[in-house]
Image (spheres, rainbow, N blue to C red):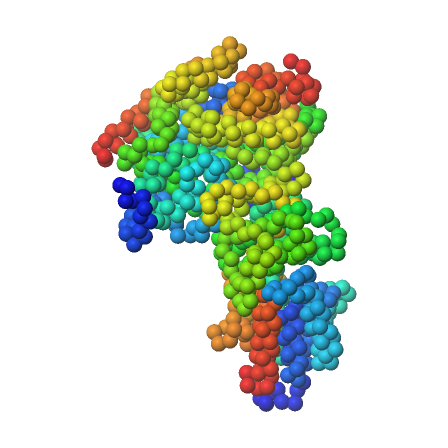
Amino acid sequence: MDTDFYTPMRLDEVESPLQDEVEKALGIDIETCMECGKCSGGCSNAHIFDFTPRKVVQLIRLGAEETLLTMDALWVCLSCQLCVDRCPSGIDIPRIMDYLREKALREGYRPSRPAVVLFYELMCSCVERRGRVSEAPLMLRFNVLTGQYLKDLTLGIRMFLKGKLPLTAGKVKKMDEVRTLFVSWHRRSVKRG
Amino acid sequence: MNESMMGKELTALVIGGGPAGIEAALKIACGGYRVVLVEKESEPGGLLRKLYSSFPRWENPSDRIGWMVDDLKRNKQIEISLESTVESVARTDNGFNVTLKNTATGGARTIDVQAVVLATGFGLMDLSAYGEYGHGIYPGVLNSLEFEERLREWSRGLGKAPKAVALIQCVGSRDRSKGYPYCSKVCCMYSAKQAGVVKDLFPEAKVYVFYIDCRAAGKGYEEFLREVIEKKHVRYVRGRPAKVLPDGGRLLVRAEDTLIGIPVEFTADVVVLAAAVVPHPETAALAKMFGAPVDEYGFIDHDLRSHAKCADRVFFAGGCGFAVDTESALSQGAAAAAEVIALFNGNG
Amino acid sequence: MQRKRVVEPEDKIREIPAVVFLFRSCTGSLEYPGTESAVTETLRCLEVEPVTDPDQTCCSGYLLTCSAHTPEVSLAVTARNLALVERKGLDTYVFCNGCYGYLKELSHILLHNQEYLEGANELIARWGYHYAGKTRIFHVQEMWYRLRERIAAKVVRPLNGLRVGVHYGCHYLARKYDILDDGGYPTFHEEIVEALGGTPVFYKERQLCCGYAVGRGFTHREEIVQPHLFKKLKNARDSGVELITTVCPGCNVALDREQPNLRERYGEDFRIPVIDLAQLIALALGVPTAKLGFEANTVPLDDVLAKVGVSE
């Protein structure tokens, strides 16, 4: 829509319930933000964010749902929690980011970084299958699935030769319990959804 | 005159010898009544004595406090009790029996007074709650009062000339997670003043003020602030810094320029923290002795009818009620004096 | 160096327990097995007996960040793990900042949302588990600091002034209401290093994030993790740091494993060994190096061991 490009955001037409939704779901009072920017001054990743934490909070107030659910910052946030640590109003921005990530996936938005979602899936399946996470095999699978076949290969071989690379994760004894947890939740989600 | 007071020599006790207390004492004395002024330090003057410069006129506060103290000392109606504190209070039919203790000699005496003006002033919050700013850890990080002292040293050619100075606003103030949701009111102006003084002393120095909002509501205040920016070339960045880090003997300030939305860094020799204004801890105890209410932060609350009155025969002025600049402290001192005189004249 | 703390360690851990539940960490037990073994050995040296359980799974923190769309699984997994501990009637001690943060957060969510708690308990009830919220969650670093005097008294291999730069890790420090120290300027690791006879180095970037959190080490290695690490390690090296300690195996992976990659990318070979604080304490307390698993490290510790006077 070419015309949108030149149209400023119409504040009188904003009708997104996003702020209400976020406040209710997370127990956070967005109105307490005074936009001082301390969150973003401390942010580990502000230099590569398309929207700094302060802007994310302001975008929620503006009801800019589309922007929030498609922004790159969702998928590069480190969840290091420094923003909420510094926030004078204690606004839990990492939790907001979690919520928006969840919402973006649920509503079928294509993440700007598909590799992140792939990693998530691999990680979950790792816990589902073994109960634990072992970094090395996970990294190998991740690299293969993202087409980076040779990445970390030299490091991997070096480590393997020195006996440092555990190729199998130790397995939790009662794996059936863990698996059933996943299955039950999958079923629950289907019933609900 | 009311009968019970007739024929008696009436005395007011003023607690605190800063600008508010001195002004109250002088005006009560002008009204023809006796005053006992109690000051815990060894000389009167309060916070104003510690300041290097003032807004909105770049005056030397020592001049003004000098004249005021001269008037005080010359006035025969006023007895100044230095290095003294209030030990205990007993309410009587028409006033109080107050026991004063001399902190230097340990001696105590009890006096009869018919009215009290609390003028204990304000202090700055303890900054150890802000580990990220490193006050008390890095020698270059000062609170605003310590910085006034540094300005005085610099003006005398003492100490190393700074290449860069950062002033951080709202440290504590407007931070509900630290328990100070209020605006401390005076920091915007005194920081502009301090930044301007640095530029006057060291025109080559880079001076940055990190602010959230610039509050310059007062006669001549906005013009003063614009002068600091436009004529003295102090730079203002909108954003509350997240941390101060040691950087090769200097200090690195990290923040977001919230108007552009990019992370910024600034290396300074001195970082000044505009700490939240808080009442002195003894204010609440003193208020309790005289039956005066205090708010949740320990500032004195006024009663419904008068802004200078907080209990029967108890009045207050200046920073013990909330953050004030010098002008307001003086006005409030005069207002409290008017209340005392009205009471003593029998119209209170 | 000791300062008044936000929470005094004596208030946080009042009585020293004789037995604790040691919550195993995926990375700390598999990638760096020396970490778990050092934690175990150190606890024993300090007369605290750690108990583990083979049925305990991943803390589910990864599950939370990795399955943002179904956080309920994480809640059930947490409830199950903590129920395991509650059966033993012990408090939970973790040795990974990630486990600490997520267990704290998820147990908080469970205990403050009746619906979630019931849902999770319903799921785990079929194996006879029930989570009631009785076990308290601590990080072992809190125990180290609580027992700093006991540690200092038992040092048999003083560090001879070894210049140690500590790395606290965001996921402990940022939990500002529930940690031992001031998140803005912590010093308790430095105090422990001093007690061991080392020289703590307050390098500028000591609180910089390692960049590895929530899988970014996999997904954004070039973009985020390596620049972070380069900045941090360069500053540490320029400040004369000879060894970095962590209290989070995730941070340890990033700081240690990435050094060869940094050499290739930036042409700088830092060669600063990175170990867990528990490994350093164990070393100073005289635990045989064979039990400390240093061979799992990418950057070898030869220089450090020589300085401390250990010949392998």
Q: Where is residue A94 drawn, in percent x and y?
A: 42, 39
Q: Residue at x 37, y 21 (%)?
A: A146
Q: Locate residue A92: give its quadrant.
A: top left
Q: Residue at x 31, y 36 (%)?
A: A104
Q: Locate residue C46: give its quadrant.
A: top right
Q: Where is residue A5 drawn, in percent x and y?
A: 31, 43
Q: Please tell me whether residue B309 is drawn above or below residue C304 in the rendered image.
A: below
Q: Give the camera-side residue of C288 and B325.
A: B325
Q: Is residue C178 visible?
A: no
Q: Please tell me whether residue B291 is drawn above or below residue B252 in the rendered image.
A: below
Q: Where is residue C99 drawn, in percent x and y?
A: 46, 31
Quadrant location of the N terminus of chain C?
top right
Describe residue A129's horizontal placement relative to residue B224 as left or right: left
Describe residue C220's horizontal placement relative to residue C306 as left or right: left
Q: Give the camera-side residue of B93 and B123.
A: B123
Q: In this view, which residue lies farthest toward the right?
A: B105
Describe residue A174's horizontal placement relative to residue B178 as left or right: left
Q: Residue at x 46, y 44 (%)?
A: B261
Q: What is the number of callouts on the image?
A: 0
Q: Is residue A188 visible?
A: yes
Q: Where is residue C136 drawn, in percent x and y?
A: 47, 36
Quadrant location of the C terminus of chain C?
top right
Q: Please tell me whether residue C301 is drawn above or below residue C121 in the rendered image.
A: above
Q: Residue at x 44, y 41 (%)?
A: A52
